[in-house]
Amino acid sequence: GNFAADKKFVVVFVLGGPGSGKGTQCANIVQHFGFTHLSAGDLLRAEIKSGSENGTMIQNMIKEGKIVPSEVTIKLLQQAMLESGNDKFLIDGFPRNEENRAAFEHVTKIEPEFVLFFDCSEEEMEQRLLSRNQGRVDDNIETIRKRFRVFVESSIPVIEYYKAKGKVSKIDAGKSVDEVFEDVKAIFSPYSA
Ligand code: B4P
């Protein structure tokens, strides 16, 4: 069976550096536009909590700011998509590198409608993450700096790939939550529920 064969899934990838506000804005988009929000980070953290055999490996990779192997993340995303019963998805924080991207397209046969890219300075992102203070193992200055490096080296190429296909909508994410959502709304208006 082909995962997406009998259903037309609408997928939007939401990308941006750590702390650029992806999770915050996805919550707004869900309320206004009826998408289901799938956060790769939240799915991985739930997998750690569940005590699965992969949990320790995932925990260590997140603590190091490294990218979890594609097959793990893709399996969690597919499960969540099927369980949701919805057909419109925001996939937040994935794909984080070219290998993630190619594997997702190969396994699911899904191409994103477009990519929402939250553009934000590292100074601003660092401040937000350090004040988030929810006890996440990856919100300390050392891991944050590693995550910035991984974002620039691994995730920017994914954004460039989709930019070359004319699929990237870039948002200035350095503004206030409300101002950013005004720009987001304009982009999602064709998808009104
Ligand atoms: P990211 O996907 O980088 O997301 P995040 O750090 O949670 O930031 P986000 O952009 O969602 O910002 P948020 O709205 O929370 O990280 C997810 C983590 O998951 C990774 O670091 C890693 O640990 C893990 N992960 C995911 N996929 C992985 C993979 N494949 N392999 C390994 N690990 C993986 O906003 C941040 C803060 O700023 C909040 O406190 C918020 O209130 C505030 N904020 C938001 N917008 C604001 C605004 N406009 N102005 C002021 N403050 C704002």
Image: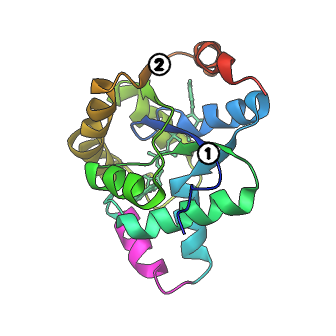
Expressed as whole percent of the image width and height from the top left, the position of residue 12 reads 54, 37
Mark 1 highlights which residue? 9
Query: Magenta stretch?
Result: 52-63
Main secondary structure of the magenta stretch: helix
First along the sequence among labels 1 and 2 = 1
> Is 150 part of what is drawn in magenta?
no
> Is 60 part of what is drawn in magenta?
yes
**Badge 2 element:** strand
In the image, taking residue 91 as reference, residue 164 lies left or right, namely left
How is this picture coloured? rainbow
Other-residue count near label 2 (Cα within 10 Å), few / some / many at <14 / 14–19 / ≥20: some
| For residue 88, above or below residue 187 | below
Classify mark 1 as within 8 Å of ligand 1 or not, answering yes or no: no
**Badge 1 element:** loop
Expressed as whole percent of the image width and height from the top left, the position of residue 75 reads 51, 68
Mark 2 highlights which residue? 171
State the quadrant of the N terminus: bottom right
Amino acid type assigned to the residue bearing label 2 in the image: Ile
